[in-house]
Image (cartoon, rainbow, N blue to C red):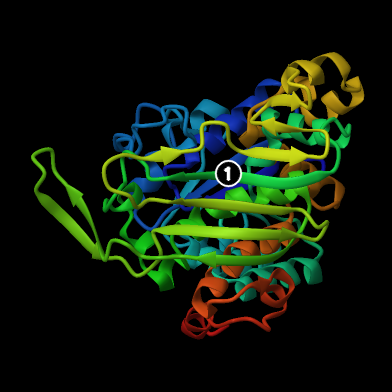
Amino acid sequence: MSDPIRIGVVGCARILPAHFRGLKALLDLDLADFRVTALCARKLDDALMFRKRGEGPEPRPSVITYAVTDPLNAPHMYVSDLHSDTLPEVFTDWRDMLARGNVDAVINLTPVGLHHTVTLDALRAGKHVIVEKPFAISVRAGQRMVDEAKARGLSLGVAEVVRYREPDRVLRWTLDQGLIGEIQMWISGGMGAPDWSPDVIIAKTPWRHRKLDAGGGPAVDGAVHLFDRIRYLCGEIDEVSALAPRFEPMRYIRDAEGRVVESVENEVEDAYFANLRFASGAVGTIFGGVAGHGEPTSLPDGPVIYGSKGCLKNTTLVLDGGQRLSALDLFAERADPSLRKRWFPSGLKDGFGLELLDFLQSIRSGTPMETDGTEGVRDLACSYALLESATLNRPVKIADVVSGAVHAYQAEIDEHYGL
């Protein structure tokens, strides 16, 4: 394929500006050749909102105030900001977009309950696909996507941005250098979020609190990021033992005066607590969620990775004897230039840009993304192992969740979708 890769976006969500920012970086650095040729959203105005600067509805207001650098707060962008020589067609049905034949690849940003439907339709239409996390509504749905892509020889990836960012690449390098010895423990956790705890509808999206629409609560929506990070840095998780309580039975949106303007019954967990056993013999503990009255709590040194020679506290290396070093500085001084070039081509450090570059290069080369569909299923299996463990009140093997041997929590989901 020598012509520009034609990209269609399905689901013009709040995360789209972060993806556009990454795509713009690729064009500015001449790292990829593509055009966004289609935008699809259930509501036409949601697609027009991203088509051309100076036209269309006003951008949506932010839904997150406590973390200004969160990708959900990326400045609003338009396709016209990426390239002026092509403006996208707009659609309200992804099937019409696929039938039109003006796209080679799809960025799937729909709610998770639609991930497998949109992705399978796109793959069957011969399109490459990258899917926002969580990869699918269930492990079985995710595996169907992987199998379809493999059968058709198409690229399929998950937009799991965390491992592409500089801090996690540096941590990976530090661990590979053996600077803390053999990995022994992972510890991380935080409870609550100022905008959403203890009982606020997350991101003003009620579907996130319905099991059949979201799959789970923060153990899926948030912890799938965490599980990808843990697996990338510390290796495969063998077993999970967990609790996943639901503290708040209802979730609300309130106006400036505190009056309830919208409510939803909360069907999923709003907190999770899990112990992990790794294939290597290492152990770990994690907790998180959007529950908790009063104020949020977090481990200020986390995540912490303990080894046989020292530990990593975020990107600070602490050795036995008390020596403290910056892993970022060590990487800058010692890492092989070819590795730095491979991880950060042309100095690019935008995680969305790097993951999308990986996707586009996968299409060109026919080789899998680093975060391909199999990785997406594995991350999802860890999240669902947590919920399966909490449901069964016993430890659960990741392999049994992948194979379907353990399926108590997900059975209702798969039955609903006919999987």
Position in image of residue 20 (x %, y %): 54, 34
Q: Residue at x 49, y 66 (%)?
A: 243
Q: According to the image, label 1 marks what residue?
A: 188
- In the picture, measured across the screen, residue 246 lies left or right of residue 85, that is left
Q: Residue at x 38, y 50 (%)?
A: 290
Position in image of residue 225 (x %, y %): 59, 49
Q: Vertical placement of 275 versus 409: above or below?
A: above
Position in image of residue 110 (x %, y %): 48, 57
Q: Vertical placement of 394 versus 287: above or below?
A: below
Element on which disc 1 rests: strand
Q: Residue at x 61, y 52 (%)?
A: 285
- In the picture, measured across the screen, residue 239 lies left or right of residue 419, that is right
What residue type is disc 1 on? Ser
Q: Residue at x 33, y 35 (%)?
A: 62
Q: Quadrant of the C terminus?
A: bottom right
Is residue 105 something that shows in the picture?
Answer: no
**Residue 157: which quarter of the image?**
bottom right
**Residue 397: which quarter of the image?**
bottom right
Position in image of residue 111 (x %, y %): 45, 59
Q: Residues within 10 Å of mark 1 (few under 14, many from 20)?
A: some
Q: Vertical placement of 123 versus 177: above or below?
A: below
